[in-house]
Amino acid sequence: MEEKNREPVEKGKSLGETLEGQLALKGMKNRVFWREEVDSTNTWAKDYASRRGGKSLDRALFMAECQSAGRGRFQRVWDSRAGENLYMSLVLWEPEIPIQSASMLTLVMGLSAAKAATRITRKKAGIKWPNDVVLSGKKICGILTEMNIKENKPQYIIIGAGVNVNQREFSEEIRDKAGSLALEAGNDFDRAQVAAEILSCFEKAYKDFLKTQDLSVLKAEYEEFLLNKDQPARIIEKGVESRGIARGITDQGELLVEDQEGKIRKIFSGEVSVRGLYSYV
Ligand code: BTN
């Protein structure tokens, strides 16, 4: 099947084509695969990588105008309507990192999206650990990272990001916690520009990450965006709730939570949901 479906979307060019041009202007060499509709850009990227993977796929970006089965964390559905948002999956082919560092890339992308959202809207975005990007208390971006392992090393990692850019109406179930760049900043944004800014922030942060293969270089910057820092948190692990004060993250990206006795516990992001006491953050 033809992988580049360049049907016109905005001003005669598809979002994928416009983005490719913007990335070239920024000196970035991402290959952009574009389709009007897919089930999920993560699934598409995984499928492509498993059939036709290779070094040339490193930093390839799979994007779609809409997703019929967008996936979120904890097997949730990611609402993926057409024409307003970004649905994109970045492939890292044979990254030089151990398997246990792969989940940290979710935080690297979260940091990159928070920085990009701040630059673009001129409003300080925040991160709800581990990787929800939040603007004025509303989630504007979610990230889903998946990995394929070969010979005990990551063969490829796919970092999928869903960014609510110009969406202004949300379904009742998510209305109280979901927002968009446009809704929080008061004006629409060029989606290709938003994607290019996120990728450019990621490229820089990823270089820093590779120096140590963990978050030690990025931790201080991540914590500047961390909305949970020094805030009370409810931690829900396999249906069991505990409470504490979030104190920051470790070099591995775990959340440090202080309990009532002053003991610090490390929370691994895998199957845990963290909430504020009275609200989503
Ligand atoms: C979350 O639950 O917060 C993560 C949401 C991740 C959604 C993005 S949209 C692009 C990529 N394709 C998917 O199916 N999911 C991710």
Image: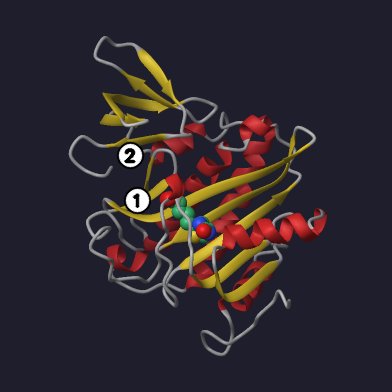
What amino acid is found at the position of numbered circle 1 in the picture?
A: Val
- The relative height of residue 99 versus residue 105 in the rendered view (above or below) is above
Q: Is residue 241 left or right of residue 106?
A: left
Q: How many other residues sit within 10 Å of disc 1, few (<14), some (14-19) or many (≥20)? A: many
Marks 1 and 2, the one that precedes in the sequence: 1
* Image color mode: secondary structure
Q: x, y (%) of residue 142?
A: 44, 52
Q: Is residue 73 above or below residue 21?
A: above
Task: Report x, y in % for residue 146.
Answer: 60, 46
User: Mark 1 touching mark 2, by CB under 8 A?
Assistant: yes
Dot 2, how many residues are within 10 Å of its Cα: few (below 14), some (14-19), or many (20+)? many
185 on left or right of 64: left
Residue 273: quarter of image: top left
Residue 55 visible (yes or no): yes
Residue at 40 percent across and 47 percent down: it is: 132
Q: Which residue is mark 2?
A: 227
Disc 2 CB within 8 Å of nearest ligand 1 atom: no
Q: Nearer the viewer, residue 143 or 19?
A: 143
Query: Residue 115 placed where, x, y %?
Result: 46, 51
